[in-house]
Image: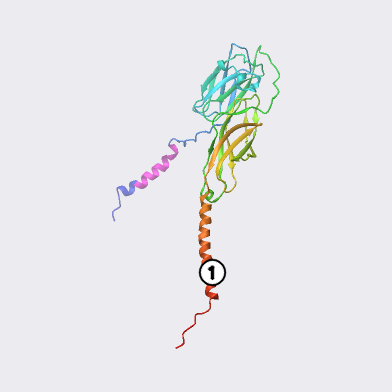
Amino acid sequence: MRARTGPYRTGPLLVVLALALAPLLPFVPAPLPAAAPGVPEVRLSQQRAAPGTGIVVSGDGWRPGTLLTLLICGQNMTGGTNTCANADGRAVTTDANGFFTLELPVVAPPEPCPCVVHVATVTGDRATRDAPLAVRGHPVAPLPRPRGPGRLAVLAAARLEGGSGLLVRFGAPPSRRLVLTVGNLGTTPVENPVFRLGTSHGVYAPQWEERRWRGTLAPGDTARIELPVELAAGAHGDYRVAVRYAGRTLAEHPWKVARPWGVTAFWVLLAVVGSAALFRVGMAVVDLVRPPAATAEP
C-alpha cells in the first residue's frame, strides 16, 4: 500500500518544530494595567532657605495631567490663602504618571512662620498637601487660637433636586435634596458642621430638624452639600425650605408640592364601589323580607 505524502505529513512536522523552538523565542510580557493614582506627596530639596533663593519642589501620586498651584504660606496656612505669598506662586501640570518638579522662588509670606509650601489642585477633585519650610530671617510666632465656629456662606443659589415617584400621587411623603455650594470665609476649619433644616407651609412657623454634613472645610475651601428634605404624608401646596448654620439663615428655597390626586381618585372609586355594594345588599334584603306574591286560583 502506498504511503501518504504531501500535506498529511507536513502538519505534524510543523507542530513538532514549533514546540522545539518555543523556548528560543523572545518572551513578550503582557501589558501591565495602568497604575492608579496614589496618595499625593510633596518633597522639598531644602527644608530651610533664605528669601531670594529658590528650592526645587517635587511630588508624585497626583492625578495625571492635573494643574497644581504652589504657594509659600505663613502660620501653617491656618488662615487660608490670605497667609500666602500669592503674587509669587507658581503653577505646574503633572505628567502622565502623576509626577511633577518645579523650582519655586523663596519669598517671605505676609504672616509669620511656621511656614509651609502649599500644593493644591486647580482642576478636578480637590487635593492639597503641605511641606514644612523654614524661611531664614522671617519672624516666627505662635499659631493664632481658633476663633468661633468658622464662617460658612452660600456661594451659589440653592436648589432642590430629585423627583416624586408614583406612590407620592397616592399620599406617600414627598422628598427632595437641598443642594447648595458653601465656602468657609473664616480663619478656622469647620469640621462636620450641623445644619438646621426647616420646612414651613403657609403662615405656620418652620419645623426645624438637624442635619449633619460629614467633612472638613478649611479656610477658603468650598464644598457641595446635599441635605435630604422630607414632608409629611399627603402634604401638598406651597412650602418653603430654609437652612441655618450658627444662628444665621444661609438659604431659602420655595417648593410647590402637587396635590396627591391618586388619593382623591381612590376615595371617589371607593365611594362608587361602596354605593353599588350597598345598593345590592339593600336589594337583597328587600327580596328577603318582601312577602311572596299571591297566585290566582284557577
Residue occupying image coordinates x 39% and y 42%: 17
Residue placed most toward the observer, 98 or 118: 118
Residue occupying image coordinates x 60% and y 36%: 242
Q: Position of residue 217 (x, y in %)?
A: 62, 29
Q: Position of residue 9 (x, y in %)?
A: 33, 48
- Which of the 4 quarters of the picture holds residue 45? top right
The quarter of the image holding the C terminus is: bottom left
Q: Position of residue 46 (x, y in %)?
A: 61, 17
Q: Is residue 223 above or below residue 116?
A: below
Q: Is residue 110 above or below residue 281?
A: above
* Render colour scheme: rainbow
Q: Position of residue 284 (x, y in %)?
A: 53, 72
> Going by the picture, which residue comes out furthest to the left?
2
Q: In the image, is residue 15 part of the stretch drawn in magenta?
A: yes
User: Magenta part of the protein: which range?
Assistant: 11-24
**What residue would you read off at disc 1?**
282
Instruction: Decide whether the magenta segment is chiefly helix, strand or loop.
Output: helix
Residue placed most toward the observer, 228 or 8: 228
Q: How many marks?
A: 1
- Which of the 4 quarters of the picture holds residue 22? top left
Residue occupying image coordinates x 45% and y 39%: 23
> Going by the picture, which residue comes out furthest to the bottom?
298
Residue placed most toward the observer, 186 or 80: 186
Q: In the image, is residue 180 part of the stretch drawn in magenta?
A: no
| Left or right side of 210 for 63 | left
Please, what is the three-letter code of the amino acid marked with disc 1? Answer: Gly
**Label 1: few (<14), some (14–19) or many (≥20) C-alpha neighbours in 10 Å:** few
